[in-house]
Image (cartoon, rainbow, N blue to C red):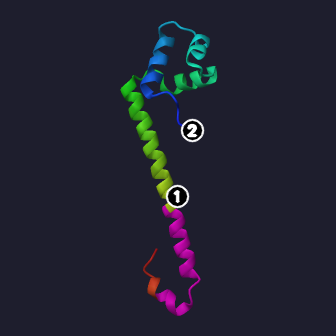
Amino acid sequence: MKKSKYSPQQIAKILKEFDNGKTAVEISREYKISTAAFYKWRERYGGMNGKELKRLKDLEEENRRLKQMYANLSLDHQMAKEIIENLPAGKQENFKALP
């Protein structure tokens, strides 16, 4: 995932400028972002201050890491099950307690 070049505080400041009367086109030119990116920020983070936005970004990053950890553990578990199933019948009995 590409990291934004704007911090959560900067995004909150940009959105506040829009609330204070600047147009989306002016903001896009000034900060060199597309209007689509601006409207995506507005939809996603509208009404949040800098601290709330930073907290949200931190939680999203933590969630991404946890999903990745789960995916890795799930693959490891699946591989272990397949290995145990392919063992000769006498050796499988040692692993019957595994789910």
Q: Which mark is residue 90?
A: none
Q: Which residue is mark 1?
A: 71
Badge count: 2
Q: Residue furthest bottom?
A: 90
**Image position, residue 75 (x, y; %):** 54, 65
Q: Residue furthest left?
A: 51
Q: Nearer the viewer, residue 43 or 17?
A: 17
Secondary structure category for the residue under label 2: loop
Say which amino acid is labelled 2: Lys
Magenta run includes residue 99: no
Residue positioned 56% across, 79% down in the render: 83
Say which amino acid is labelled 1: Ala
Q: Which residue is mark 2?
A: 2
**Tag nearer the camera, 1 or 2:** 2
Secondary structure category for the residue under label 1: helix
Residue 31 sits in which quadrant? top right
Look at the image and give the residue range highlighted in magenta. 73-93
**Image position, residue 82 (x, y; %):** 57, 76
Magenta run includes residue 92: yes
Q: Main secondary structure of the magenta part?
A: helix
Residue positioned 53% across, 36% down in the render: 3
Up-down relation of residue 29 to residue 7 (above or below): above
